[in-house]
Image (cartoon, rainbow, N blue to C red):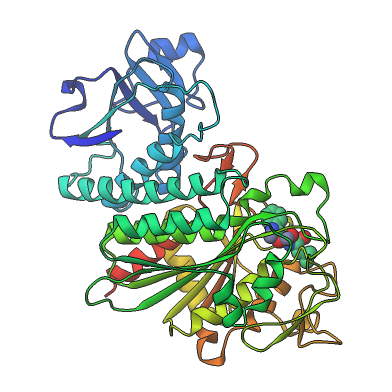
Amino acid sequence: MRFQITNKKLSEIKADLELIFVVDKNLKHKFIKDEKAFKFANYKGESVLLLLESGRIYVPLNKLDYDELRIAAAKTYNAVKSLNVKSLKLASYVAGCQKMSFQALIEGFLLGAYEFNKYKEKKEKYALKDVIFSREEFSGEDVRENDAKDGFAHGEIIASATNFTKDVVNEIPEIYTPQKMAEEAQNLAKNYPNLSCKIYDEKFLEKEKMNAFLAVNKASVHPPRLIHLIYKPKGAKKRVIFVGKGLTYDSGGLSLKPADFMLTMKADKSGAAAAMGIIKGAAELNLPFEIHAILGATENMIGGNAYKPDDVLISRSGVSIEVRNTDAEGRLVLADCLSYAQDFKPDILIDMATLTGACVVGLGEYTSGIMGNNEELKAEFKAKAAKSGELNTILEFNPHLRELIKSQIADVSNTGSSRYGGAITAGLFLDKFIKDEFKDKWIHQDIAGPAYTEKAWGYNQAGATGAGVRMNLYYLCAMAKEL
Ligand code: BES
Ligand code: ZN
Ligand code: ZN
């Protein structure tokens, strides 16, 4: 899709279809012209109305808000994609910041247009190619062309990073092995001059005493990979390290998941996939930070050589871990990856993981859990990520829950001793592996809910959503603006 903005009035632009967002449910605005047809169709502005004869499509926009713009754009795309509509024209709609409004719309179109059709015999070809904005604005604002163009550029980069992550997550476990993830990362590094990539195999993990990570991999026929991507622009101002859970499949291990819960566990690599998407986006946006993505890639499988409940693992940091459930494997991989990440002295350390079902139970399928020790950092993240439209909620640590991961035989247990508070006890487990000097610099993001969806919502199709990519890129962009 191509996006452009012109000085021409909406009525002067040539296009196959005119798009009007219905903001005012009284249907009173100078862009709204089909009152007769509305009466006929009993249209109240609550759904999409396509009027082929007048060449107009009306799409509801609940309010002028960035995420509503994304949703309305995606809705539009879905409504016209199977028509022979090659070009679409619309006015400008500003919800606060001009650049952000265009950016959100472009994200909505491009995220909404995503499809994972690799395994379908019939691949649909959609006609829509051109989206043309008029500088005529909904509320009469004077639209700055440069802001619109900046919005187009950023929107395209951020949507493309998100869609890249969706491709990684949607790919099937038979194909998307740890080795495949390593190749993908190397490929990224080849395509961007400021990116470099190091791949480490099981021998390195052994040398580094990453025994928690290695234990998870034991019963897999696919060897593990520690993937380290680095984006290093000249004169970088800060070092931000992302650590991603890259379980290319999580069967639960010997604490085997029931069949219904195992399905979708190809998505257990979503944290790592998001970290790759963020690095790709950061490189294209030329962000002024040194950004690392450290990915722990392995499967969690069963077999005679599988690690077991009752095992005690000595992690890279020296902390011993009692394994009480092999399905709490993500935190084991992350424990060693976080330990490795701190060797690189991050100014900000963020891990992303589809870590717990408890987080999904607690927050619902649409929201990520944000945890950490630094109240200010968490609040800052939340505020800066807000415009991305990704939902997140801060989950507070407390000393009572910390009690629950005590072990009688080791330094820490990999499960909480209570059925309750599982998202937070998992976060507290990770905290065991954060050194004092980084306690205040660390944020844990449990993306188990939104990373993968079995039904479409908002601008997300069924399948991977690319959770984590937008909220972190928006956070980084907002931070860059403050420099
Ligand atoms: N990958 C799962 C968490 C998950 C569940 C992600 C649902 C996405 C959707 C994780 O490895 C896991 O199985 N966690 C266990 C931990 C428990 C055994 C303490 C869980 O949440 O049940
Ligand atoms: Zn698991
Ligand atoms: Zn898992």
> Residue at 23% across / 39% down in the picture?
140
Q: Is residue 424 left or right of residue 139?
A: right
Up-down relation of residue 70 to residue 44 (above or below): below
Q: Is residue 128 left or right of residue 242?
A: left
What is the residue that sits farthest to the bottom in this orientation?
436
Which part of the image, by quadrant, shows the N terminus? top left
- x then y, percent, for residue 418: 85, 72
> Residue at 37% across / 56% down in the picture?
188
- x then y, percent, for residue 11: 20, 21
Q: Quadrant of residue 133?
A: top left
Towards the viewer: 142 or 482 = 482
Towards the viewer: 275 or 318 = 318
- Viewer can see residue 242: yes
- x then y, percent, for residue 151: 27, 49
Q: Is residue 42 left or right of residue 482?
A: right
Q: Quadrant of ligand 3?
A: bottom right
- Viewer can see residue 360: no
Up-down relation of residue 424 to residue 264 (above or below): below
> Residue at 74% across / 82% down in the picture?
402
Up-down relation of residue 134 to residue 389 (above or below): above
Towards the viewer: 377 or 279 = 279
